[in-house]
Image: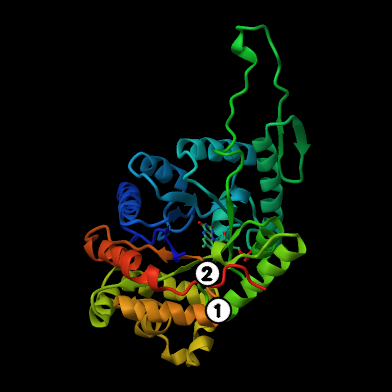
Amino acid sequence: MAMETGLIVHPYMRPERTARQTFDWCVQQAVEADKIGFDSIMFSEHASQRWENIPNPELIIAAAARQTERIKFAPMAHILPHHNPAKLAIMVGWLSQILEGRYFLGVGAGAYPQSTYIHGIKNGEDTQFTNEMVRESLEIMERIWKREPFFYEGRFWNAGYPEELHGEEGDDQHMLADLSPWGGAPEIAVTGFSAKSPSMKFAGERGFRPMSIFSGLDALKTHWDTYSTAAEANGHVADRARYHVSQTVFVADTDKEAKRLVMEGPIGYCFERYLIPIWWRFGMMDGFIKDAGADRADVDLEWVVDNVFCVGSPDTVVDKINTLFEASGGWGTLQVESHDYYDDPAPWFNSLAMIQKEVAPKISLPVSVTS
Ligand SMILES: Cc1cc2nc3c(=O)[nH]c(=O)nc-3n(C[C@H](O)[C@H](O)[C@H](O)COP(=O)(O)O)c2cc1C
């Protein structure tokens, strides 16, 4: 079994992009990734960030559904505290039916308190609180997907499912629409980020897929420990083949060319202006500094490209990923972080094609079931 390939589209578009440009670039990437043979593509959901300007991933997924054949789609993630769970359960069910199963559901608590504030929640930075909302929301969604009568009065929301009435033969008024997901329930993936991640614990307890942003070896280790301990305590197998980790990966014919294209192109621009400051703010940079045995004063874009990203020729990137897998235990799907190649997609699509054909098949996958 080869490592699976995925894209994750946040989408890190330059602030001056229009909604139409962002939307078109997202759909274009789905179509191309499908042709190249990527296994999955994820779109994030943000209501506040200028650089992360997808408020409704489901609109992109629906648009791309008709132009793709085999790639699987996921919102990564629907931010459950921001949604009415009944409305979301029905939308997710219908969309997974439209995709005839090429869909899985990513859920999260929300990265940015400003976005949570827009949705009427003032304490968005309290992740314990937002995670409690995630749990209640998902409980409601799962009950709606079962299509059995209930009425639930919760801490955050009320919802129910009605009795189906039985009328006269030939009178269809009583029939309820079946808007449950394709196959009954969708596969669910949960995003984890913080060191003591409540989300990873939740994913383990429920046997959902875990997903982390690469934030250094300690963070990956803690996430996997939290996930696998909770999974095993609840009778689930903790299988690293189901683990998704997102990372910045860029491949070109030579190391020199790959590094130049990253430093001088959209990835470098985005990191200088947006992601390097975010990495400092969220503490991710400290993990990378520790892994490299570096000094804070060493950190600039070039240091990040050399020490954190997987950038280079196919052979170099294979070595970098295999080294990471050896140190961390590895994961089943590499979810490549997408960037704004709207003006000139060729280097980006070349890189994705090389990742698919020349990198993924040479990665030594973890033994799928851990101790
Ligand atoms: C791969 C990945 C994707 C994410 N996508 C989003 C997103 O689209 N929107 C958002 O507000 N937060 C997103 N987040 C952040 C989560 O909503 C949430 O802040 C985080 O997973 C909470 O993790 P914790 O329980 O480990 O603290 C993402 C996190 C990860 C790891």
Residue at 49 percent of width and 71 percent of height? 365
Residue that label 1 marks: 328
The x and y percentages for residue 169 are 64, 7
Is label 1 in a helix, a strand or a loop? helix
Marks 1 and 2 in Cβ contact (< 8 Å): yes
**Left/right of residue 61 with respect to residue 183 in the rendered view:** left
Residue 195 appears in the figure: no
The x and y percentages for residue 351 are 29, 67
Q: Which amino acid does label 2 sit on?
A: Trp
Residue 345, placed above or below residue 275: above
Q: What residue type is labelled 1?
A: Ser
Residue 312, placed above or below residue 175: below
Residue that label 2 marks: 331
The x and y percentages for residue 214 are 50, 72
Q: How far apart are marks 1 and 2 (CA)?
A: 9 Å
The x and y percentages for residue 122 are 65, 55
